[in-house]
Image (spheres, rainbow, N blue to C red):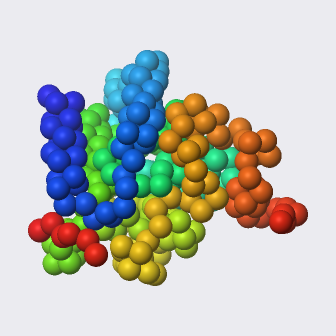
């Protein structure tokens, strides 16, 4: 049921962004979508085949009375609320760390190398990111004894919001401002996909906006106009960004098959020096 709902939402968003795109440049779907959806399918296949998952961890912790919520006597609604808050904070922290540590960034930058943003971008993740995310989530689920039912609901809602926030849509100012009081919107998240690093390193939340507001990483609007914003990363803007196998191999690229500018960008995140070489339609 949840999978069906997700694909219905995905198709609906795909139709809307075709009819009323926020960024009207060439979307290159023919080149981008096989790679993006291929990464999505690979990522989901690995997570489905993994012997351990966040849900498994929640059930194990409950059955063995491990974790704060499983040892404390709290009402079900409290356990569900805490589960949602802890999970959303965990996603925020992991996302922040993926941007701040060089090795994690080389994995996560696959998501940011897309030179256009649409529904396919939401699933464009390197499979190692799923593995790293699982390693960073399972201990939290066990330590807090998170509620398995709330975990399922949050996972489904997060997937739906993720698809919507990556859609190539621009909400009207009033609707956007109302929704982003709590939830991440396409307007807000598109800033996170800007090629300007100060904007890339902002708006980390996946569902809720309050963690970005609380920790000072919230960015209201882009430095330039929305329609003047460059999507992707400056270091690589050629056919490699839509090459499936290049995306898979790219985290190990340190000097080989990378241009000097790309090396400089990664070195900057490493904080190590490197020698130099030569108007949209609105919805709502």
In this rendering, the count of numbered labels is 0
Q: Quadrant of the C terminus?
A: bottom left
Q: Quadrant of the N terminus?
A: top left
Residue 83 located left or right of residue 202:
left
**Residue depicted at x 42% and y 42%:** 32
The picture places residue 164, in percent across and down from the top left corner, at: 25, 53
The picture places residue 147, in percent across and down from the top left corner, at: 29, 38
The picture places residue 175, in percent across and down from the top left corner, at: 15, 72
The picture places residue 278, in percent across and down from the top left corner, at: 83, 66
**Residue depicted at x 35% and y 30%:** 55
Residue 155 located left or right of residue 179:
right
Q: Residue 45's image quarter? A: top left
Instruction: Looking at the picture, tell me which residue is in the foreground, 219 or 71.
Output: 219
Q: Residue 189's image quarter? A: bottom left
Instruction: Looking at the picture, tell me which residue is in the foreground, 183 or 222.
Output: 222
Is residue 159 at all visible to an observer of this figure?
A: yes
**Residue depicted at x 73% and y 64%:** 268
Q: Relative to residue 192, is residue 141 depicted above or below?
A: above
Q: Residue furthest right?
A: 275
Q: Relative to residue 79, is residue 115 depicted above or below?
A: below
**Residue depicted at x 17% and y 48%:** 15
Q: Residue furthest left?
A: 284
Is residue 77 at all visible to an observer of this figure?
A: no
């Amino acid at each position: 049921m949840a999978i069906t709902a997700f694909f219905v939402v995905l198709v609906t968003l795909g139709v809307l962004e075709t009819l009323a795109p926020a960024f009207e440049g060439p979307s290159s779907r023919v080149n981008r979508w096989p790679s993006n959806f291929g990464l999505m399918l690979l990522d989901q296949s690995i997570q489905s085949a993994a012997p351990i998952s966040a849900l498994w961890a929640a059930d194990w912790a409950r059955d063995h009375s491990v974790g704060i919520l499983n040892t404390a006597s709290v009402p079900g609604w409290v356990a569900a609320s805490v589960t949602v808050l802890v999970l959303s904070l965990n996603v925020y922290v992991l996302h922040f760390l993926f941007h701040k540590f060089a090795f994690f960034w080389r994995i996560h930058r696959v998501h940011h190398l897309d030179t256009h943003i649409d529904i396919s971008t939401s699933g464009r993740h390197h499979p190692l990111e799923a593995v790293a995310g699982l390693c960073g989530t399972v201990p939290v689920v066990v330590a807090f004894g998170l509620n398995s039912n709330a975990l399922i609901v949050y996972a489904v809602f997060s997937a739906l919001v993720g698809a919507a926030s990556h859609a190539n849509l621009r909400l009207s100012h009033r609707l956007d401002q109302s929704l982003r009081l709590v939830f991440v919107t396409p307007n807000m998240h598109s800033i996170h996909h800007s090629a300007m690093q100060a904007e890339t390193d902002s708006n980390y939340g996946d569902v809720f906006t309050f963690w970005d507001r609380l920790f000072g990483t919230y960015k209201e609007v882009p430095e330039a106009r929305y329609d003047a914003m460059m999507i992707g990363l400056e270091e690589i803007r050629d056919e490699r960004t839509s090459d499936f196998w290049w995306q898979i191999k790219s985290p190990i690229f340190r000097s080989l098959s990378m241009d000097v500018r790309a090396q400089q960008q990664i070195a900057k995140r490493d904080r190590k020096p490197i020698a130099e070489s030569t108007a949209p339609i609105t919805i709502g």
